[in-house]
Image (spheres, helix red, strand yellow):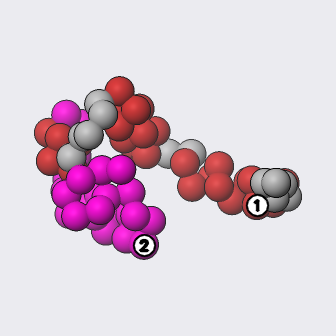
Amino acid sequence: MAKVKTAKQMERHLKGMANHHRIEILLFIASNDGATLDDIVTALGANEKTLRKAHEGHQFFGGREVF
């Protein structure tokens, strides 16, 4: 049985996603199965170094593959 999150925990998770750049990345990943970090950088005009630093410890990017 899944543990129900408290309102405070949900707020914290939603604040983490509440950024238009992050939302663009999530939408891109959702519509591009197997997208790599290079694909995201090219499609969104993002800076690879910034993306890596922003997501350190969040495991959005495993090596160069996105999962």
Direction top: furthest residue: 31
Instruction: Give the magenta range.
Output: 43-67
Q: Residue 16 lies in magenta, yes or no?
A: no
Quadrant of residue 39 in the image? top left
Tell me if residue 14 can be seen: yes
What x and y, as percent, mark residue 10? Answer: 74, 53
Identify which residue is drawn at 38% across, 57% down. Answer: 60
Q: Which residue is mark 1?
A: 9
The amino acid on which the numbered mark 1 sits, given as a three-letter code, is: Gln
Q: Which residue is mark 2?
A: 57
The residue carrying pointer 2 sits among few (fewer than 14), some (14 to 19) or many (20 or more) residues within 10 Å by Cα, namely: few
Q: Nearer the viewer, residue 44 or 5?
A: 5
Identify which residue is drawn at 40% across, 64% down. Answer: 59
Quadrant of residue 34 in the image? top left
Q: Are marks 1 and 2 in contact (CB under 8 Å)?
A: no
What x and y, as percent, mark residue 26? Answer: 42, 39
